[in-house]
Amino acid sequence: MVTIRVNASTPYDVTIERGDAWLDRVPYFSCSTVWVITDETVDRLHGTAFRTRLEASARPIVWSVVRPGDGSKSLATIERLVADGLTSGCDRDTLVVAFGGGMIGDLAGFLASVYMRGLHYIQVPTTVLAHDSAVGGKVAVNHPLAKNAIGAFYQPAGVHYNVDRLETLTDRDVLSGLGELIKHAYLSRYVLGYSFETELFTALAQGPLDWEAWLARGIEVKRQVVETDEREHGVRAWLNFGHTFGHALESVEAYRLAHGEAILYGMVYAFLVAGDFSRAETLAGFMKQQAITPVLWQPFEAYLEVMGHDKKNRTGQIRFVLLGEEVTVTSVTTERLVEAYNQLKGWF
Ligand SMILES: NC(=O)c1ccc[n+]([C@@H]2O[C@H](COP(=O)([O-])OP(=O)(O)OC[C@H]3O[C@@H](n4cnc5c(N)ncnc54)[C@H](O)[C@@H]3O)[C@@H](O)[C@H]2O)c1
């Protein structure tokens, strides 16, 4: 078992282990009600076992299930969930449990931040990608004009991974999760002072990863960044590496691509913008080998428009996180963006 302490404004532990022994250790269950938010797929695969285990907490359990996919990350779903909570007796002492991937973590975390002006919540992540989303307290739902446009910084009381649940993920969802892990590997050099980029690509070439060890490494990067800059005034923006174009791709593709897949394309694009063809080529090669979902390329203006709405552009300019000797967060000319786009399209 691995435990990582995150010293955010309200500190909490991230535990990664096989099984759910964390349920016997944590102090949360003095709450009035346990309110689990999950999606249909996680419910079908893991719901019964988790619920049986939770029942030992001897608290009433409210169980809300939403449709899988980013389409559920919406204000409409929040309204429906609030109705579930109100009609099931959830009160200010209810503990929200986000049981699922990053979509559920963002949705349930946002629900916890607004329901009766704020409930405690914990993350029980079930995807590889959620090693990123479950840590750091960014919670949100999407708006038709922009992803994650309605949200808050709201730290969980704990994050508890049972890596056995990752075994039921599809190859595509594993690849999507690897997108964020690879991002953390690229950032490790700048954040931790040493790089595990080469080590990760070597391990990936050798076969399935030891999740306990590798998720911990990704989370270590995230922890360091969040502790330094919890509310994204500076260094936390680095975590958006690959996300400027990635989010636009996700949105233009109407969420047909998994989040991490879009980020993988976004990172290749960011390397091309920075003129780092070597890393762009290595990453693109890995993605093709993993049979990444192909993009239905659109005229560049479609992506440009969405990037213009992106919430990270406080100055009205489209800003990119670029990796070189240092990390820079910078605006880029449209000519350069179009050139890199044509290169990217040519590769996939
Ligand atoms: N808050 C943050 O800091 C942050 C960071 C990165 C990404 N995100 C968000 O995370 C979301 C993407 O996360 P995700 O990829 O985990 O998406 P997801 O939650 O939609 O899960 C992907 C798919 O896997 C299924 N699934 C989940 N666990 C499973 C399991 N154990 N076995 C089989 N299937 C399982 C889900 O039903 C879904 O179909 C996006 O909404 C993105 O915006 C948030």
Image (tube, rainbow, N blue to C red):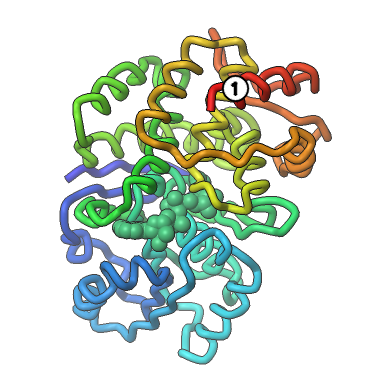
Quadrant in which the N terminus appears? top left
**Of the pair 151 and 147, the residue shown nearer to us:** 147
Ligand 1 lies in quarter: bottom left
How many marks do you count on the picture?
1
Q: Residue at (26%, 52%) from the top-left corner?
A: 166
- Residue 165 at least partly seen: yes
**Of the pair 151 and 280, the residue shown nearer to us:** 280
Image position of 197 with respect to 276: above or below = below
Check disc 1 and give the amino acid type: Gly
Residue 144 on image: x %, y %: 72, 58
- Residue 124 at least partly seen: no
**Of the pair 208 and 59, the residue shown nearer to us:** 208
Residue lying farthest right?
316
Q: Which residue is mark 1?
A: 346
Residue 198 on image: x %, y %: 32, 16
Image position of 212 with respect to 326: above or below = below
**Picture quarter containing residue 50?**
bottom left
**Picture quarter containing residue 32?**
bottom left
Image position of 128 with respect to 93: above or below = above
Q: Residue at (23%, 51%) from the top-left corner?
A: 163
**Picture quarter containing residue 230?**
top right
Residue 291 on image: x %, y %: 39, 36
Residue 117 on image: x %, y %: 60, 71
What secondary structure is marked by label 1?
Answer: helix
Q: Residue at (57%, 52%) from the top-left corner?
A: 255
| 240 horizontally vs 26: left or right | right
